[in-house]
Image (tube, helix red, strand yellow):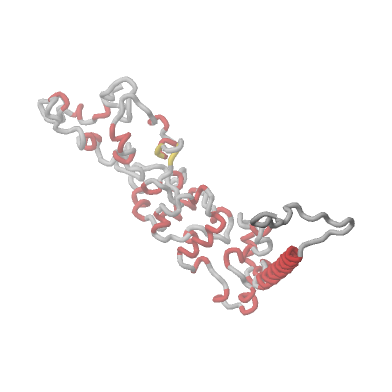
C-alpha cells in the first residue's frame, strides 16, 4: 500500500437525487421556517402599529365639527390638496397639529399642537417637513428671518385664503413687511422713492423673505447679477470702460434703494458731493482736481453737476472718461 496510506476524499459532486422525490437538507428547512415565521410576525407588528397609529388620529371631519369657520376657509387654501391625496389624506389638519384623537375627546387645548404658539424653531420644523426642498426656502438658514428666529407663522396665515398665505398682492406684502421693518418703511416716505407705497412694487421684488446668500437677502437676476438689473437693464454691462464702484461695490454705493432727497435717489443731496468723495484733490494732474485753478473749478456753477459731462457713469463703450 505504501506509506503514508492514501485516505479517500469525499466527492465534490452532490449525490444524485432519487427519481420523483426532492430531498432537502434539514438546516435549509429550519432556516426557511424561521424566515416565514419572522415575516409573519413582522407583518402582524406592522398591522398592529398602523392600527395603533390610526387610533391616535381623529380625521378632518372631527376637526370641522368644532372649527367650522377654519374648515370653510381651509377649503379655499392651497393646503386643501393635502386633504385629497398622499399620506395625510383625510387628516390634513393633523399633518400640522399632530394626532388629535385626545383633543377631540376632551376638548383640552393642551392635547393638540398649535404651530402659532410653538417656539420658532419647532414651528419652522413643522413647515419644512413639506417645504424643505422648494426653491423659495433654499436660503432659509442664511436669511435674516432664520437667524433671528422669525417663525413662518409670523408672516403666513395658514388657515386663511390664498392671498393671506402666499402673499402675492403688493399691498398685503408691503403692509406685512412694514409691521417689523419700520425704518425701511420710513425711508419710502422721502420725496424720491421706488413706487412701492403706490402699490406698483412690493418688497419681495427685490428681497427674498426666506433668505439668500447675498447681503440683506437681495434677489439676483440672470444667475448672479444684482436684482436691480431686472428693471434697469440699460445699466447692465460689461463695459470696456467701467466705473469701478459699479463693479466692485454695487448700486448701493451711490444710490439709496428705498428713498432719497435726490431725484436720482443718490446717497447725497447733490451729485458733486457724492463724486468728490472719491474724485477730490487729485494733485498729480491739476486738470482733474477740484480745487482752483484746476479745470474743474467748483466755484463755477457749470462744474457742480458732474453728470452734465460725465453722463455715462455706469460705464462707457467708447470713452474712459465716461463722457460718451
Lateral position of residue 7 relative to residue 287, left or right: right
Q: Splitting the image into 4 quarters, where does residue 306 fall? A: top left
| Residue at position x 73%, y 69% in the image | 37
Q: Splitting the image into 4 quarters, where does residue 300 fall? A: top left
Taking the view exactly as shown, the residue that stands out farthest to the right is 20
Residue 58: x %, y % from top left: 66, 71
Residue 107: x %, y % from top left: 61, 77
Lateral position of residue 271 relative to residue 298, left or right: right
Along the line of sight, which residue is nearer the eye, 284 or 155?
284
Taking the view exactly as shown, the residue that stands out farthest to the bottom is 106
Residue 62 in view: no
Quadrant for the C terminus, please: top left
Taking the view exactly as shown, the residue that stands out farthest to the top is 318
Along the line of sight, which residue is nearer the eye, 137 or 25?
25
Residue 303: x %, y % from top left: 20, 28
Residue 276 in view: yes
Residue 224 vs 151, above or below: the answer is above
Residue 255 vs 51, above or below: the answer is above
Q: Splitting the image into 4 quarters, where does residue 305 fall? A: top left
Taking the view exactly as shown, the residue that stands out farthest to the left is 293
| Residue at position x 36%, y 55% in the image | 182
Along the line of sight, which residue is nearer the eye, 323 or 278?
278
Lateral position of residue 115 relative to residue 301, left or right: right
Residue 323: x %, y % from top left: 28, 23
Residue 162 vs 115, above or below: the answer is above
| Residue at position x 14%, y 25% in the image | 285
Quadrant for the N terminus, please: bottom right
Lateral position of residue 203 relative to residue 256, left or right: right
Along the line of sight, which residue is nearer the eye, 228 or 129?
129
Amino acid at each position: 500500500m505504501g506509506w503514508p496510506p492514501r485516505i479517500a476524499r469525499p466527492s465534490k459532486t452532490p449525490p444524485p437525487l432519487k427519481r420523483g422525490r426532492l430531498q432537502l437538507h434539514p438546516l435549509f428547512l429550519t432556516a426557511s421556517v424561521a424566515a416565514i415565521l419572522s415575516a409573519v410576525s413582522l407583518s402582524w407588528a406592522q398591522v398592529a402599529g398602523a392600527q395603533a397609529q390610526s387610533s391616535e388620529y381623529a380625521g378632518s371631519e372631527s376637526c370641522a365639527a368644532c372649527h367650522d369657520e377654519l374648515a370653510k376657509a381651509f377649503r379655499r387654501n392651497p393646503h386643501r390638496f393635502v386633504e385629497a391625496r398622499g399620506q395625510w389624506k383625510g387628516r390634513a389638519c393633523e399633518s400640522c397639529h399632530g394626532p388629535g384623537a385626545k383633543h377631540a375627546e376632551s376638548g383640552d387645548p393642551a392635547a393638540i399642537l398649535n404651530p402659532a404658539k410653538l417656539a420658532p424653531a419647532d414651528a419652522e420644523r413643522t413647515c419644512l417637513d413639506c417645504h424643505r426642498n422648494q426653491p423659495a426656502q433654499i436660503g432659509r438658514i442664511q436669511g435674516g428671518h432664520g437667524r433671528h428666529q422669525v417663525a413662518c407663522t409670523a408672516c403666513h396665515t395658514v388657515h386663511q385664503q390664498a392671498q393671506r398665505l402666499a402673499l402675492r398682492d403688493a399691498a398685503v406684502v408691503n403692509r406685512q413687511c412694514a409691521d417689523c421693518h419700520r425704518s425701511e418703511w420710513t425711508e419710502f416716505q422721502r420725496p424720491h422713492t421706488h413706487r412701492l407705497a403706490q402699490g406698483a412694487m412690493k418688497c419681495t421684488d427685490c428681497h427674498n423673505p426666506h433668505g439668500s446668500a447675498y447681503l440683506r437677502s437681495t434677489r439676483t437676476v440672470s444667475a448672479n447679477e444684482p436684482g436691480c438689473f431686472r428693471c434697469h437693464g440699460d445699466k447692465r454691462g460689461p463695459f470696456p470702460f467701467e466705473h469701478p464702484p459699479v463693479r466692485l461695490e454695487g448700486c448701493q454705493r451711490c444710490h439709496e434703494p428705498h428713498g432719497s432727497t435726490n431725484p436720482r435717489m443718490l446717497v447725497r443731496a447733490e451729485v458733486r458731493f457724492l463724486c468728490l468723495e472719491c474724485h477730490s484733490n487729485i494733485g498729480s494732474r491739476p486738470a482733474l482736481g477740484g480745487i482752483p485753478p484746476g479745470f474743474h473749478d467748483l466755484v463755477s456753477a457749470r462744474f457742480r453737476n458732474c453728470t452734465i459731462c460725465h453722463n455715462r457713469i455706469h460705464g462707457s463703450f467708447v470713452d474712459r472718461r465716461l463722457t460718451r
